[in-house]
Amino acid sequence: MGRTQSLAMLVALALGLSACSSGASVPTSLSDTGSSSVRMGAWSPSQLDLIAATGDPAVMPSTPGFSPGVLYVNRVYVDQNRAAHAAQLAVITAGEGISNAFIGVYDPSDDKLLATTADLSQSLQKPGIIRADLTTEIPAQPMNKKLWIVLLIGGMTKPPTVIGGREYGSNLGLTGDYRLWVSDANNLTSFPVTMPKLKVPEHGSIPFVAIAG
């Protein structure tokens, strides 16, 4: 088993333990959920007590590459109707010379920035699971509402490697409503209040990023 897969499994386990320690309950049958629409066999962010996430970190096989000053915009859907207070990311190998690094959340309905973390530069220069508080609470959103979780590293001499999806085909041949976008600008050091002009990357791996309560 490779280092990426091992850490991915560790991330999933750690997040799962976090969910248990926070008092989250796991239904044992459909009757416990009050809804016959819940599919217990399918993975969803709520299984790790996450509100929204780009994917299951236990099965994400790749390590995305990053360029400085670029927004990496990841489409997610709300999986729990509760307020969000933190963002999460998993670093496999440390970056170097990192500055102005943040995770932010935008609302695609009006392109407005909802919340951001403080600077994560120090955290990205060591391996491990990052759980960073959002500087502003994101109020509970409707189930299945689309959000963008965005990663920015303003400057770096060596990028960190993080858990992510496969390198090619991230957008699955779609012609719109892509899963991954990048900003047209490549000199950003903070999040604009309104989402800037975006473009579709020629190829790219979606990083594991998530928001939680």
Image: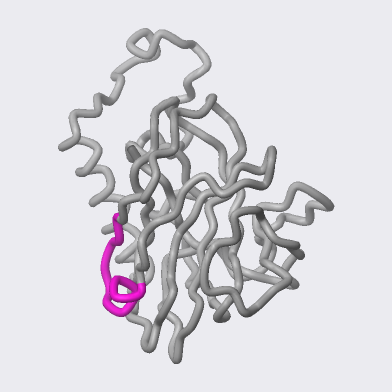
Measuring from the top left, give residue 131's x and y in whole percent.
29, 55
Image quadrant containing the C terminus: top left
Measuring from the top left, give residue 151's x and y in whole percent.
51, 63
Magenta region includes residue 127: yes
Count of numbered circles in the view: 0
Residue at left 42%, top 37%?
51
Q: Which residues are magenta?
A: 121-131
Image quadrant containing the N terminus: bottom left
Measuring from the top left, give residue 130's x and y in whole percent.
30, 61
Residue at left 45%, top 91%?
157
Height in image: 68 above or below 74? below
Measuring from the top left, give residue 65's x and y in whole percent.
54, 77
Left or right: 204, with 152 as reference point: right
Residue at left 48%, top 34%?
42
Q: Residue furthest front?
A: 193
Left or right: 195, with 210 as reference point: right
Which corner quadrant of the image does residue 103 belong to? bottom left
Magenta region includes residue 150: no
The reply to whether residue 2 is in sight is no
Residue at left 52%, top 67%?
190
The reply to whether residue 194 is in sight is yes
